[in-house]
Amino acid sequence: MRRTSARQDRGRGRQPPLRPDAAGLRLPLRAAVITGRPRSRFRAFGLRTRLMLAFLLVAAVSAGTTAALTYREARSAVLQTAQDTAVTSFRDQVQLTGFALPVQGGEDLEAVLRDIARKGKPHPWVVFAEYGSVRASSGENPVSTVITPELRRAARANPHGSFERVVKDGVPYLTIAMPMVFKTSPDSVLPSGLVLYAVMRMTDEQVNVDALLMAGRDGALPGLAVALIPGLIAARSVLRPVRELSQAARSMGSGRLDTRIAVRGSDELADLARTFNESAAQLEQSVRELREAEARARRFASDVSHELRTPLAGMLAVTEVLDEDADHLDADTARAVRLVSAETGKLAVLVEDLMEISRFDARAAELNADEVDVAEAIRKTLHNRHWTDTDGRVRTELPDGIRARLDPRRFDIVIANLVGNALRHGSAPVTVRLRTEARSPGTPTLLITEVADNGPGIQPAVLPHIFDRFYKADAARTRSAGSGLGLAITWENVKLHGGTIHARNLPGGGAVFTVGIPLHTEEAGG
């Protein structure tokens, strides 16, 4: 039987089915997106910290607003009470005191002012009198430095009196101006020109106001400290379901699709837990159906391949006999015999490839590694398929002395598929290079095998799907010389060795496939 073991490739292309690594459900690989690096339970600006800061901010704003409003009202009440008492008392005293006009300065006027001052409420007053150029007071100085020009103007303009709060040298004062008037009628008065002023210290009221401020501040700070307790309780009640949801998501990402969250209460977090459980149940059902469908598909392909092997063996034997006698047949019959022989050979290759793929999908493929001379193994592969340097189709750059632990049969398939693919879809000469590449310290040295051709290269849109099963770059090409699975089988064999394979285009034209396998594959989990 005349067949080549080099198979499939760049040319094949319907809609891409599954990547070789997606033939089975690889939930643990998807979990890497969820798990990532280990998460710390406490973060500098995590949800717990933000909740606490928000709670404390609300408590601080509420306490501050309440304290400010309370302070303002209490301060106003304290000052208003003292002010009203003083103004009313001073007005009554002025109205009860009689002055002989015109007013003359002297001991008599000062005695009257001292008498008024002694009756001051709620605190003692210092009383001043101004009449023309006459100035007198109940104190030592006849003129006050606390009374402002604005108050004097207000006293002349308002016959019913005026008052003003003044702070001088850090001391608060209440100043009251009360002009002496004569009633000319029930609704009108006539100013006499005499104006009495009362100056009262408000240090006691200021002390009371300061005490209110200190009490508000001293009460707000412990209140904020106490607010930490309900804040921690609230943060815990919110974070516990979130933490359970995170753990459940990581558990599902690692493949445990039966993970569920306990539903507590009827709030939004409980709704979130119920939604998660419903989604997890649907996902588990979908994955179970996909797994069952995948298992059925694998069994079907495996069973069909096994059932076809026996009749194909007989067909191949018959076609070989017919093929040998084709030269003695008429032209049309010989052409038909050769066509049947070629198609039977292709069908046999497809069945073998399907069986190989089914073994990979069922995780039944094993690596029988042995220490081999890599250059000699490649030369043997090329020689067995009659790809030699003599015909100029294949060139080699194979340094001697490179030994590695490989599965000889599977490595033979890798080299044969890549070289056959390059000859079929690229252009001769095809170059096979072998070298080793040292990586970072602590990692194994790589065995690098490159297969390059001189063809047009691979289209950029095809490169991401080059190792997909049955992929075709040109949908119009419904037939090709290979089975459509060669590069997919190559990918699986390289992966089984713990290695990687990549395809790219060379700057000067042509494509190159690079296989990297650790020199000690037994450490790579092959």
Image (tube, helix red, strand yellow):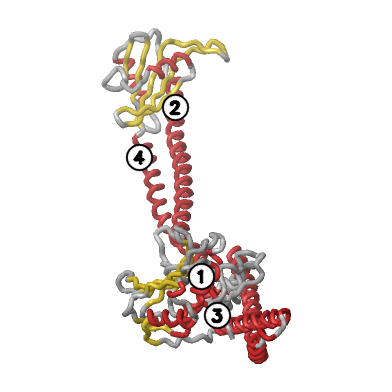
Q: Residue at x 46, y 30 (%)?
A: 84
Q: Within the image, what quadrant is residue 205 found in?
A: top left
Name the foreground residue: 92 vs 24: 24
Within 10 Å of the Cα at label 3, are there few (<14), some (14-19), or many (20+) other Cα atoms?
some
Cβ–Cβ below 8 Å for labels 1 and 2? no
Q: Earlier in the sequence, mark 2 or mark 4?
A: 2
Of the numbered discs 1 and 4, the one sitting upstream in the chain is 4
Query: What kind of element bears circle 1?
Result: helix
> From the viewer's perspective, is 245 left or right of 229?
right
**Type of residue at label 1?**
Ala
Give the labeled residue for mark 1. Answer: 422
Q: Position of residue 83 (x, y in %)?
A: 43, 31
Name the mark nearer the viewer: 1 or 4.
1
Q: Amino acid at mark 2?
A: Val
Please tell me which residue is depicted at 48% across the width and 49% down the height of the picture.
62
Mark 2–mark 4 Cα distance, whole angstroms, equals 21 Å
Location of the N terminus by quadrant is: bottom right
Q: In the displayed structure, would residue 146 be above or below residue 506?
A: above
Quarter location, residue 374: bottom left
Q: Is residue 329 above or below residue 445?
A: below
* Sequence-first tag of 3 and 4: 3
